[in-house]
Amino acid sequence: MDENHPDGFLRHSREPIGKRDPHERIGDYREIYAPSWREEHLRQQGERCMDCGVPTCMGGCPIGNLIPEWNDLVVRGRWREALARLHATNNFPEFTGYTCPAPCEPACTLAYNADAVAIKSLERAIVDRGWEMGWIRPEPPLRRTGKRVAVVGSGPAGLACAQQLNRAGHRVTVFERDEALGGLMTLGIPDFKFAKHQVERRLDQLRKEGIEFRTGVEIGPAMSLAQLRERFDAVCLAIGAQQHRDVTVPGRELAGIHYGMPYLTAENRHQAGRGNPTIDAHGKRVVVLGGGDTGADCVATAHRQGALDVAQISVREQPPPTRPTDNPWPWQPRIYEQTYALEEGGRALFALNVTAFVDDDGDGVVDALITERVKWTLDAQGRRKDKTVLEEDIRIPADLVLIAIGFQGAQAQAFVDQGLKLDDNGTLAADETMMTNLDGVFASGDARRGASLVVWAIGEGRDVARHIDIYLMGESQLPPSLQTLTSPTDD
């Protein structure tokens, strides 16, 4: 292995860790990714990382991961040091190594005119090796400050915040309204995209570091925000942004039409042995509305439940196969890439706008959707503005419709009733220190910035922990934000 590798990208082609065969994986709920990898293969992939001088990959990463550093350490076989560099900016690199869409890769210098470094695969391999070798262990603080912090929400933002504050010496209690910890990592993302033992071993680490967890406690109905503020020196609200966007057309009240996230949550609970799925696609014609990650997860779950047919509808036009001229490197490429779910089967339908849900036989259950084919005029930011209808009354049969068209803010009415202010987009309003209008109450993650990527949530958790530490102590030794101005285009 050549440890000086400026020409590695010329000697090795891009070969990420692959996925299992679609025909095999569709029959189970095990992770879709290849379960193992060869060290020699990953070291070669690390050699493709150039000494490019300006590591734009770090600019494409919302938390500024030290990508060239840990790539080089992998090449040199120094895996434990690579893990330390990975943990320097990311509390839970397996969360991102398995689920992140990797905006760092299209920002890679090689991606300008070649295939990017397989950054996501290298990240996954480093943390895989860390767990395998027993290098990831609890790191309780050497001293305690006497300050107590409540974190509301146990998703990636809440967990990252809790771990950082605990390591600063504060006593941290995490409150979770659901029966299971982990937020959408546990109840939202399907098992076949992220195995739940990966969440559990991190939770075990956090418990041994001294963090207390309380499940089944919804702040608002069970305990007021005022009570929380009385008991703790600071509060962090990391409650996510699960206020669903809806499709308000005739027939929306029909049975058989559901939001996508509750569908995924029910199946996750079923796979965990906590009841049967309340929404079952078995033997049904399924239509998923929404072309994003949640929609893809709904498609893949319907496959595994034994759906008769699955169609995924996007209101957007199908992206081109190559970059448009107004979408240059290093921005996230707006090109068509088949999702893992559609690799397994189903149909992708583009530029269709739903105008009605139909009940043919009067039994109160949906039988079809009526759609129109549209062409959109976009504004300067690339958002849909005006539409031209190209074709009307396109009928699509459906026995089950899953709405996965995004979210529009936090489920925060209980907090609003107690004086908390929201921004116009429904997220929790906060200042530059991430504090809300209530003294000592901070906001983080999707609840503050809107629904986004897991990697953004981890960065938000790290950032808010530093701000809370400064609020409590006047200064902080926690690392400052490594977020950059180069954000994913879906931010």
Image: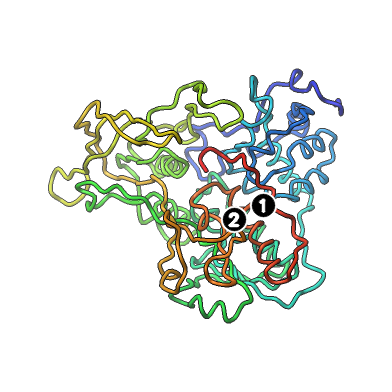
Q: Quarter-wise, where is residue 170 in the image?
A: bottom right
Q: Secondary structure at mark 2?
A: helix
Residue identified by numbered label 1: 92
The amino acid beneath tag 1 is Phe
What kind of element bears circle 1? loop
Percent x, y of residue 193: 54, 44
What is the crowding at mark 1: few (fewer than 14 residues within 10 Å), some, or many (at least 20)?
many
Look at the image and tell me whether residue 313 can be seen.
Answer: no
- Horizontal side, residue 210 vs residue 181: left or right: right
Tell me if 306 is positioned left or right of 391 in this view.
Answer: right
Task: Identify residue type, mark 2.
Answer: Pro
Residue 425's place in the image compared with 420, above or below, is: above
Image location of residue 305, percent across then percent down: 40, 45
Instruction: Give how far apart the Cα atoms at labels 1 and 2 are.
Output: 8 Å
> What's the residue at 24%, 52% (across, down)?
255
The answer to whether the residues at label 1 and label 2 have Cβ atoms under 8 Å apart is yes
Instruction: Find residue 83 and report its horizontal and vertical position in percent.
Output: 77, 46
**What colour-coding does the image apply?**
rainbow
Identify which residue, 434 or 352, lies in the foreground: 434
- Location of residue 64 with respect to 119 vertically, above or below: below
Q: Which residue is disc 2 drawn over? A: 156
373, 253: nearer the viewer? 373
Tell which circle, 1 or 2, labels the residue nearer the N-terminal end.
1
Determine the image quadrant of residue 301: top left
Quarter of the rendering occupied by the N terminus: top right
* Residue 6: % across, % down: 81, 24
Q: Residue furthest left?
A: 362
Camera-nearest residue between 328 and 228: 328
Q: Nearer the viewer, residue 461 or 449?
A: 449
